[in-house]
Amino acid sequence: METKAKTAMYKFAVFGNPIEHSLSPKIHALFAQQTGVQIEYSKILAPIDGFSQVAQNFINLGANGFNITVPFKMNAFDLATKRSINAQTAGAVNTIKVDGNELIGENTDGIGLVNDLTQNLNIDLHNKVVLILGAGGATRGILLPLLQQQPAQIIIANRTASKAKQLAKDFAKFGKTCGFGLEKINGDDPVDIIINATSASLDGQMPNIAAGVANNAICYDLMYGRQTPFMDWAKANQASMVFDGLGMLVEQAAAAFKFWTDKQPETQVVIKTIRALND
Ligand code: ATR
């Protein structure tokens, strides 16, 4: 008797508030096309105080997994029944895989940044001095994967010095970290890479930091989609290279796609397509 080959259709979504701007459905559609996997991937606007209910409804409809963006990554951490080491250290979850009764929480933001830096931009982090601006959720999310690359040191500099010091202490067991107020970074000690993980770019602002520190450094803004004040500052102050976070966006999505489907997409072609759409 002839048996009909069944093609599984994965059911995914991204939750956020706002969510309209999200590029994730487009990125995952390109991954699916490329890898021959059948998916549906929707954008779901959850009410600010109603994430877990909306997520539960989606799970009840047979979801295989979902992404979580601002402001629900901490709610997703609470919703998960198991959490990866990246999710635990980040204190936040951006990807959930539904596995029977378990909701497995992962955080692919840091892996996404590291893959963009090392694989797409050919930047070796080993033995480098990395300066991170900001000490909020975004910094917490990238610290472990960055430290796993064994940089010489990660310096966290923040407007509120106490938060940078606390984060440096929390991650000291994973590598060499130290924390300061922004005003302590004066450009006397050269750094190799500067990562802007503050939310200042969202408000069209630049963290208040000595110009000399950009000299010869590779500068990377986690924000994407427009030229940010940090990128302008880096260019004006002799940075060796300046990048936005579009590659990280695509790489964190690729890590989620792999986590769900076990298929590794080709990211560079997707980064080019998304950049062209976005310009
Ligand atoms: P996220 O989840 O995006 O990291 P967050 O946890 O609210 O958001 O953290 C925002 C970070 O950006 C903080 O480190 C904040 O500095 P403070 O801890 O001093 O508030 C930093 N930030 C925001 N606007 C800034 C600005 N204009 N200049 C410098 N740092 C800024």
Image (tube, rainbow, N blue to C red):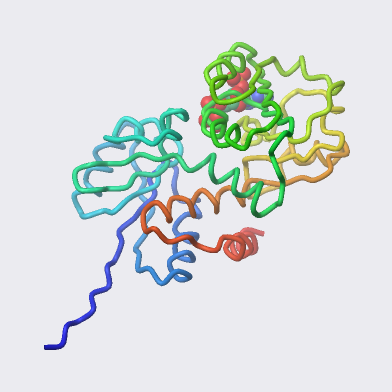
Q: Is residue 248 left or right of residue 226?
A: left
The residue lying at 55 percent from left, 51 percent from top is 251
Q: Residue 230's quadrant in the figure?
A: top right
Residue at point 63%, 25% (across, down): 134
| Residue 235 percent location from the top left of the image | 83, 42
Q: Which image quadrant is residue 216 in?
A: top right
Q: How many marks?
A: 0
**Between residues 63 and 179, which one lies in front from this camera angle?**
179
Quarter of the N terminus within the rendering: bottom left
> Which is nearer the eye, 278 or 79?
79
Q: Is residue 263 placed above or below 75 in the rendered structure?
A: below
Quadrant housing the C terminus:
bottom right
Q: Looking at the picture, how far across and down is residue 84, in whole percent?
A: 39, 36
Q: Residue farthest to the top?
A: 162
Quadrant hosting residue 81: top left
Q: Is residue 151 left or right of residue 261?
A: right
| Residue 162 in the figure: left or right of residue 231 | left
Q: Is residue 227 above or below residue 12?
A: above
Q: Is residue 260 above or below residue 272?
A: above
Which quarter of the rendered image does ligand 1 occupy? top right
**Is 149 situated left or right of 261 in this image?**
right
Residue 242 place in picture, x, y as percent = 76, 45
Seen at 35% across and 68% down, the residue is: 38
Residue located farthest toward the left when viewing the structure as drawn: 1
Residue 278 drawn above or below residue 191: below
